Structures are given as structure tokens and as C-alpha cells.
Amino acid sequence: MLGWLRQLLPLRTPAPSPAVAQALRLIRARYDAATTNDENRRHWANADNLSANAANSPDVRRLLRNRARYEVANNSYARGIVLTLANDAIGTGPRLQMLTENAEANRRIEQEWMTWSRAVGLPEKLRTLRMARASDGEGFATLITNPALPTRVQLDLTLIEADQVTTPDLLGVEPNAIDGIVFDRFGNPLEYHVLKQHPGDPTGTLYGESVRVPARNVIHYFRRDRAGQGRGIPDITSALPLFAHLRRYTLAVITAAEIAALPGGVLYTDAPANGEAESVEPMDLIELERGMLMTMPGGWKMNQMEAQFPTTTYGEFKREILNEIARCLNMPFAISAGNSSGYNYASGRLDHQMYFKAIRVEQAHLETVVLDRILAAWLDEAVLIPGLLPVDGDGRSSAQRWTTPRAAPGAGSRAGSWHTWFFDGHEHVDPLKESSAQALRLANHTTTDADEYARRGLDWETQLRQRAKELDLMSQLGLPLPGVSLDQQHEESDAETADEAETAA
């Protein structure tokens, strides 16, 4: 009835005002990704709005750690990717260069630091920390005193697995604390709760006795992906399902190949039910020998099982899934797979540039969070040892002014440019082109020797002093100098000898 009246007497609604029209447009605005329907409901079923610490709860982190460790221990690709990442980020270990005005103090500190780092095995411990961040999500180290060290500085690092950093009684934790870490109101860590024994030890328990370690003695190395995040998750978290797919597909291909190669089959008969055929036990198994013929029961035939062997898609599948796995680590396919057969010069160099940039970012983070903290603690102890470091005219060690005031944990370098760190350089894919470009940059004054040596992880002062010694020895032995022919060198030597004789006369 009302519809008939509307058709008979159409009503005209007034046009909405511009403000109302704008509001209606805002209300009607929508995104496809914000729409929930039958197609995407299951895909985003696990999406939540938890905070970083709530999402990374102790149970979630424990489960991710266990699965990541399992893949690294049993998957050769996962193992190789983690090892390569640690070797490229740490290499043979960082080298310290002091940049103060006191050259003698710089040399003494660098020598003592190098001796100490070798004694404690610092490069190996740093590589273990990097591997722990990839598979465990975070690495912990405590600064302790080790009287067994052969160096005068007794500082040492003890690595701790993430399982041990936990609060046994989660119900009694302060509001400004998460599992294993207590913070102040500014978000700075105050203390860490460390179990005396690993929960996985035969003599350990899940909630054993713990000790409270001050934050100044603990190094916590992890990647903070979200604001307010206090604990880390494995770097390979997003790739864990892909590692499982890779192993399952590989096993399936191997099984298909074995079925195709072995004489497996099924017995069948064309005789009707209760027909003329010898009786055979249902689901019975017959062992077949390779290279042998055998007879079948009367009325029965054998049909070999056909296996569809995916020879054309197996290599392509592995390449694509490895490429996706390595993407979460900013690692190109050539490095993750250890195979550059499909690369040309341009594509290989472009991929390596992206990877090496990511490595430099990680090294800068490592310097701030780990190395500067260790150096500060090392200097705090070194200045207390008489005769270890040079002494200025006022009787103070040259390092004493750098160790005060004490910086907060994780604050990094306490003086802007009094030291720097060098890591191993990366070899160029074409050394000839790189050397030509280097010579051109030096000739155009667009770079310095310090920058060029730093690209290779070398100290420019040490290298130039060594080069001066080599050139001096080559000149004494009469060897041709680089860039100078032997005849020209003899002419210059004779001219110098004649000038000296004339001057003496």
C-alpha cells in the first residue's frame, strides 16, 4: 500500500547540506583489507590487537625458540643461513681504533684491548650472540671477573641463553616489569632475573632459583620491532613454516623417486569373484629382489605403481621458497642457497649491495648495544691497574676522563669521536674494477685513505706505517718501487749520491 502511494505521489527529499554530505562520504569510506567476508575470515582469524609484550608472552617465546632451534639443528639451509649471517656480521671480530690526540695512549689501549679480546674469545662469543638472536630472538651476556684469564684485565663475558632470563614467580612481578626484566619509570632496565640453572638441564627445573643481576652487568642483544617491546623473538620466525614446507616437499620428492626406482606394485586379477584363481591373503606383502624375475599365483597379475616425479618443478620450487625464506633476513638468494650459478655480474652486485647495507646496520647496532658497553667496562678496570695505560702529566691515566661519568646501560659511546670500530671488509666481485674506481676517487679527492681502508675493515694509520716500512726496505734492497721502473730508480739514486758528494766537497 505504501509502495503504491509512493509511486502515485513521489516524495522529494531535500538535498543534504555540504557538511552532512562530507560526513556521509567519511562514513561510507572503506578499505578492502578492512572488510571481513567469507573469503578472508579464516586468513585473518589470528589477527589481534595485543601489545608487543603481551604478544611475545613467555609461552609464545618458548615455543618459537624451540621450533627455531629445531629447524636450525635439522635443516641444512637454516643452519647455513644462520652461520653465514653470523660470519658476515661479526667476521673475525671487531677491531678497536682510538682517536684521541695522545698517539701513545691510542697505541697502548689498542694493543691491550686486542690481547684481552683474544684471551676471552670475544669474536666467537659475538658470533654466538648473533646466532642466538637469529634462532632464539635474543642473546644475553653478563660481565664478570675471571681470575683465570692470562691478561691483567680480569673482565670476562658469560653467555646466557634466553631460557634462563625469566622470573620464576610471574604473579609477584611489578607493573613496570616483564618476564625476567624490571624497568624504571623511564623504561630503563634496572635488573635481570637469571635462573642459576638452565630449565632444560637434567638437574634444573622449570621454575628454579634465580638471582637478580644489576642491569649495568647485563648485555641484552635483540631487535626491537615494536614500541615498548622488552623481549625479542627469533629473526627467522616468519620463515619457520616455509622451512617445514621445504623439508616436506624434499621428502615427498625423494619418496616419489624411490617408488619409481624400486619394483613395487599391486596384485590384481581379471577373474570374477569366486572364479578360477588361486587364493591370496588380503593385504599380504611380497618381498621383491632387484634384478630378479618371479612367478605370480595362478590367475593373478602384477601392476607396478607409477610415481609422478616432479623433476621440472622441484628446482624452481626450492629456489622460490629459499628466496622467500631469506627475505626476512635481507639476504639474497645467492647467499642463502650458496649458489650463484643463475646470476650475472650486475644482478649479483646489486643483491650484495642490499645485503651488505643490512650488515652495516646490524654492525652499528652491535657497536652501540654490545661493544661500547664492553669497552666502557674494560676501561673502568684498566685504569685501576698501575702501569697498564699511559699516564698524563697530571698523573691521571689517559682513559680516566673517558670512563666518567658513567653512561646508562645501552647508551653507547660516551664521547662522540674518541674511538671507532672496524669489521672485516667485503670482497668485491670484480677487484680490477673496484681498484680503478678507488684510484679515481682518490685522484678526484672524493674520498680519503681512511675511508678506503675502512671499507676493507683496516686501520689506515697501521696500514700506512706498514707500507712505509716496506718501501724503505725495498729501497735498501734495491728492489723496484711500485710505479717506478728500475732504471729510473737507479738514475735517481745516482743523482742523490752525486748531490751528496758535491755538498760534502
Image (cartoon, helix red, strand yellow):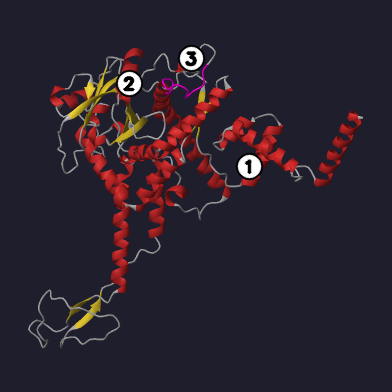
Q: Which residue is mark 3?
A: 396
Q: At numbered mark 1, what does the secondary structure look like: helix, strand or loop? A: helix
Vertical placement of 149 versus 490: above or below?
above
Q: Is residue 396 left or right of residue 503?
A: left
In magenta stretch: residue 400: no
Which quarter of the figure has residue 280? bottom left
Magenta-colored span: 382-391
Q: Assess disc 1: are there few (<14), some (14-19) or many (≥20) residues with their C-alpha within 10 Å of its C-alpha.
A: few
Q: Which residue is mark 1?
A: 434
- Give me the C-alpha separation between circle 2 and circle 1: 56 Å
Q: In this orientation, which residue lies closer to the viewer: 212 or 362?
A: 212
User: Quadrant location of the N terminus?
Assistant: top left
- Give me the C-alpha separation between circle 3 and circle 1: 46 Å
Which quarter of the figure has residue 219? top left
Q: At numbered mark 3, what does the secondary structure look like: helix, strand or loop? A: loop
Q: Assess disc 3: are there few (<14), some (14-19) or many (≥20) residues with their C-alpha within 10 Å of its C-alpha.
A: few
Q: Amino acid at mark 1?
A: Glu
Earlier in the chain: of badge 3 and badge 1, it is 3
Extreme residue toward the top, this view: 394
Q: Which residue is mark 2?
A: 26
In magenta stretch: residue 383: yes
Q: Position of residue 111 (x, y in %)?
A: 51, 31
Q: Nearer the viewer, mark 3 or mark 2?
A: 3
